[in-house]
Image: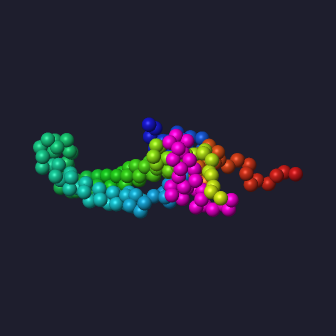
Amino acid sequence: MRIPLFKPWRAFSQLDSFSDEECEKFVGDAWANCRPFEAAMPIIVGPLMFLVWPALVLLGLRFPLVARWIYVPQSSDGAIILLVVTSVIVGCASALISRDFVLYLLIRRELSRADCPKCGQSLRGLPVQTIGEIPDPAKNFVRCAECGKVYHLLDLGLAPRDLVPLEQRRVPIDFARKRKR
């Protein structure tokens, strides 16, 4: 698995053919489709670790096996400064790590949104069929190519655009430019 530092969408090979702007839009869609507690996770984890870290360090100093691996300055002022600085660093780092972990899970979920719930086969690229002659979103359905089960798109929370393969969703570079005459 690839672990990118600044562009988390580069961890997914499905998004390699897209530009950074398109991937940022995809990440924005993933954040928009997330649950409220998932979006709040980094906001909760950072301050929580800021408060829990000093207690863990002080508790660790009570055990001789742990205390020999923790450096504590001899002066009380130095120990307090070290504890405050490490608390800030650990709080910020844990917020960033939890944000990246949640973002990884959201992108993975967004990529698998158009998968068959029964067999896990991708429904992308399959033709969307409609019952009746009048176009109605409630009557759009797709049949899984692997297991043959029929799914209404609204039941899956999908639109016909979601079943377009990712490679075909690209907008041409010269789209909406004025033609030279």
Q: Toward the viewer: 82 or 21?
A: 21
76 relative to 15, above or below? below
What is the span of residues highlighted in magenta in the rendered image?
133-159
Residue at horizontal 74 percent and vertical 49 percent from the top: 174
Q: Toward the viewer: 52 or 162?
A: 162
Q: Toward the viewer: 163 or 111?
A: 163
Residue at horizontal 61 percent and vertical 54 percent from the top: 160
Q: Name, please, the residue furthest toward the front.
A: 132
The picture places residue 70, in percent across and down from the top left corner, at 20, 45
Report the coloring of the rendering: rainbow
Residue 134 in magenta stretch: yes
Residue at horizontal 43 percent and vertical 49 percent from the top: 105
The answer to whether one can see residue 100 in this image is no
Residue 139 in magenta stretch: yes
The answer to whether one can see residue 171 in this image is yes
Q: Toward the viewer: 23 or 155?
A: 155
For residue 51, side relative to residue 20 (left or right)? left
